Amino acid sequence: MKNETSHIILKAEQLSIGYKTKKIETVIASNINFELQKGQLIGLVGANGIGKSTLLRTLIKVQPELSGAISLNNKDLKSTSTLELAKQLSIVLTEPLTSKNLSVFELVALGRHPYTNWIGNLTENDTTTINNALSLVNISELKDKKCYELSDGQLQKVMIARALAQDTAIIVLDEPTSHLDMYHKAYILKLLQKLTKETGKTILFSSHEIDLAIQLCDTMIVMTKGQVVCDKPCHLISKGVFNSLFPKDLIVFDDKTGSFRVTK
């Protein structure tokens, strides 16, 4: 049991998420419990507006939880300092990039910020780490290009490289395949799967690409109106969890193929 516990990187216990003002508390989801293992690809899925981004923001300490506890590497997230968190967890969000005049190398180098001095000077080790990150996502040949010259797919790979350069045990991505065509959606998720195997990092991402997540993820967190379930995709299928994601008058889940289909 001790050995299993040592491999848990992110844990939620009786977690309740949502928004709180002085007068009212809006609960998005409650009774959330999961244990995420090191070195896995984990997909967070659910219908639009179910609270996936709210859960991610809570897990990365951007938004406070309403109740319950979150622990990162067996330490309470509340007591983890901003600098300490930046050395353990890196994020790739969906917000538009504001620094497209930077070169690819310069943007990826921003991932080294938690380790550089106040001037931001890069050491030889920093440069090696940046180049390794570029190589891992196969964009070394783009390092001198300006970010405004890149396609959406290329830019997403640059953002993943920046997270890799931050050299954290866990990477969290919010909708990494949005605005991409089907080929690049599959490419990015296959890349994330490859990175978990090659680096041993834990990668948690939210996505609407449920069929792809079922095929590629080690573990999935499924958010429905009634519950939040975390398990291996095959177990989730056998439990019928995916059957409750969408109204059955339009879309149903086929247990045999492990995919959704439109009802006739």
Image (tube, grey):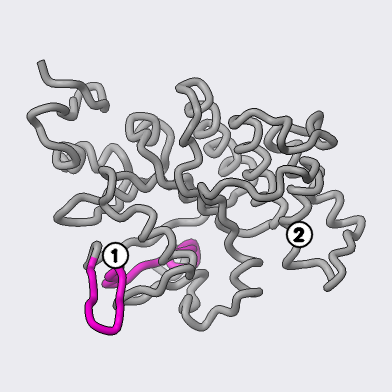
| Amino acid beneath label 2 | Arg
The reply, left or right, for residue 77 in relation to residue 243 is right
Query: What span is in magenta?
Result: 5-27
Q: Quadrant of residue 48?
A: top left
Q: Nearer the viewer, residue 39 or 141?
A: 141
**Would residue 77 be visible to someone looking at this image?**
yes
Vertical order, 247 against 184 (above or below): below
Residue most extreme to the top? 264
Q: Quadrant of residue 149?
A: top right
Was residue 62 drawn as part of the magenta stretch in this picture?
A: no
Q: Which residue is mark 1?
A: 33
Vertical order, 113 against 233 (above or below): below
Question: Residue 51 got which mark?
Answer: none
Residue 72 in picture, x, y percent from top left: 49, 70
Q: Nearer the viewer, residue 1 or 14?
A: 14
| Amino acid beneath label 1 | Asn
The number of discs equals 2
Q: Residue at x 51, y 83 (%)?
A: 79
**Would residue 39 be visible to someone looking at this image?**
no
Chain-order first, disc 2 or disc 1: 1
Q: Residues within 10 Å of mark 2 (few under 14, many from 20)?
A: many
The reply, left or right, for residue 164 in relation to residue 118 is left
Q: Of helix, strand and loop, which one carries label 1?
A: strand
Q: Which residue is mark 2?
A: 112
Residue most extreme to the right? 124
The reply, left or right, for residue 159 in relation to residue 2 is right
Q: Residue at x 25, y 53 (%)?
A: 229
Magenta stretch, overall SS: strand
